[in-house]
Structures are given as structure tokens and as C-alpha cells.
Image: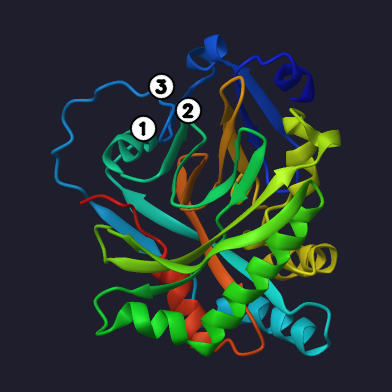
Amino acid sequence: MDELSLQEVPYFFVIDFLSENVEIYQENEIEKSGLIIDFQNFSTKKTKQNLHKKIEWKSFPETLESFKTGFDKVQKNIRLGNSYLVNYTRKTKIETNLSLEEIFYHSEAKYKVFYKDFFVFFSPETFVKIIDGKILTYPMKGTIDASIENAAEILKNDKKEKAEHYTVVDLLRNDLSMVADDVCVDQFQHIDFIKTRQKDLYAMSSEISGKIKPEFDRKVGSIIQKLLPAGSILGAPKPKTLEIILDAEGYDRGYYTGVCGWFDGKNVDSCVMIRFIEKDDDQLYFKSGGGITHMSKLEDEYQEMKNKIYVPIH
């Protein structure tokens, strides 16, 4: 990645959660790789017809008891002081009459990627942007059902959601400081509206920026490597929280909560791979979760995990 970015050669990169698999595609290799990409400033999607068929969609979430097993492990570690924020995720079986490619073309999101016979995601969350030597990140933490009266205000003032958001902002400010100088929070607790077929949601995000340090100038690979795994889908402190996650979740996240991005020869736009559907044999799974703090209530977190099993089709 460093080599190509120093040469100003455009490429697309895909990195899994544990940074064990890194895939890099130059522009002329994307189509034959089986990837279709739709970012705000870069897209390889083609116009698709027949987006009007009646959509069938069912999810089969695990029981509350099953969810509780990992949740209790997370809470125990938080009580012991090993972590103060853990992003706990689950894998849910889903059934739909849409193929992964049809889900890609039906859904609307800031970042969408279809990977042939493997996965599709429709993510609202930017990982980092690099624009003219400046690096920006937009951590997203905290969601609420938008149909609730005064939902945006409730979300902003919810003690648990607020603590989670403060923690991630602090964590990512520290992360950016490894690769950038003059790091500051430009926007705090901004509320985004996300429209979906099942329900509308509000999500809370902030903006943090800094000036890339000279030793990282144009070295996109080195910058990304320093920042992974993404703090917003891990927790804090990072190394210990990763251990807790691997023990509590009991399944392989794979590319879910990894990152991917487009380097256009000068600048980078990248996202966290959330809102993620994976194909395993002939079965589809939706991977989703949320942040756990000492204030988290089991039933609320279970509900949040289920709320996120949606496709933004409307």
C-alpha cells in the first residue's frame, strides 16, 4: 500500500478485522476481482433494472440466554477494570429472496461493497479520510429508534450512550495522534438520520482531524496499519479489549468490522465494514452488535443488536 501510494497509483484495499488478510486492487483489477464498489466519490456499479420485486426478509436472532453468555463475560471484565468499553457483536441467520448482489443494488448507504459469493455491506460509518495531508475520522457510537418522541435529544443526553461516545472520541483522538499532529475534535455529538425498511434510526457521530506527521506523508499503508483495528468497533483499551472480544463472541468476525477504502492517487476515503451480510455455504448471516459499558442493560443491548439487523431499502 505504501509503495503504490508513494507512486500515486490509485487502488482499492480491503482489510479484515484482525488485519490478517489484506487485499489490494488497482483500478483495472476491480471488475475481475468480483467486487462492486459504491462510495460517495468512487463507484464501479452499473445501472440495474428490476429493483421492484416484493422483498422477503426474515431474521432469526439468537435467544436472550445465548446473547447473555458473552454479555456476562464482557461485563465481568469491565467490573475487573480490564476494559471500559467493549463492542460485542453477534452473528444472526437471515433469510431473504434477494441475492447478495440484489441487496447491494437495493440498499442505500454512504459506503456499499459487494464481494461476489462472499459478502455485502452497506455502511454509514467512515473510518478515515485523508485529504491534502489532513486526516479526518468520524466515530459513530449510539443509536436510537427515530420514531420515539424527542429521539435525537434523548440519544444526546442518554448517560450510557454519552459515556460510550465520549470514550470512542477519546480513543480515536489518541489513535490519530500516533500519525498526526494538531489533533482536535471539530464536531461533537452530531446526529445522523438513517432510513431503513424496518425502522428509522438516529445515530450519533463526531468529527476529529489532524495534520499527518511528515514521517507518514503519503504512506497510506503505514497510517492504516497504525490505526487498526478501528476503535469504534473494538473498544478501549484496545489490546485487552480485543482479547475480551475474541473470548466473549465465540465466532470469527472475518471481514466484518474490518476496513476498506479507495486511494485515488492523492487522497483516501475509507469505511468500517459494518451492516454486513455474509454468505457461508448457502446460508446468509447478518453480523451486528453494539458497545457495552458498565451501565449497559442486557435487554437493551440485545434489542440494539436486533435493531441493527436491517437493510436500508425504502
The answer for how far apart the CA atoms under marks 3 and 2 are is: 14 Å
Judge the density around disc 2: few (<14), some (14-19), many (≥20) Cα neighbours within 10 Å. Answer: some
**143 above or below 50?**
below
> Which one is in front, 56 or 225?
225
**Residue corresponding to mark 3:** 44
Q: For mark 1, give the secondary structure.
A: helix
Q: Residue at x 28, y 66 (%)?
A: 200
Q: Are the two marked residues, 2 and 1, in contact with CB atoms closer than 8 angstroms?
A: yes
Q: In this view, does 314 lie to the left or right of 291?
A: left
Residue 260 on image: x %, y %: 59, 37
In the rendered view, tell whether residue 13 sits above or below residue 112: above
Look at label 2 and name its amino acid: Lys
- Tell me the residue that label 1 is attached to: 101
- Earlier-in-chain disc, 1 versus 3: 3
Location of residue 211 by image quarter: top right
Label 3, secondary structure: give it. Answer: loop
Residue at figure coordinates x 27%, y 82% from the top left: 148
Disc 3 or 2, which lies upstream in sequence? 3
Please tell me whether mark 1 or mark 3 is closer to you in this view: 3
Q: How crowded is mark 3: few (under 14 residues within 10 Å), some or many (20 or more)?
A: few
Label 2 residue SS? loop
User: At label 3, which amino acid type do we have?
Assistant: Thr
Query: In the current view of this chain or complex, which residue is farthest to the top?
Result: 28
**Residue furthest front in the image:** 182
The amino acid beneath tag 1 is Glu
Numbered circles on residues, count: 3
Q: Name the residue under label 2.
A: 116
Name above or below for residue 130 compared with residue 17: above
The percent position of residue 3, horizontal first and vertical second, equals 78, 18
Between the C-alphas of marks 1 and 3, the distance is: 13 Å
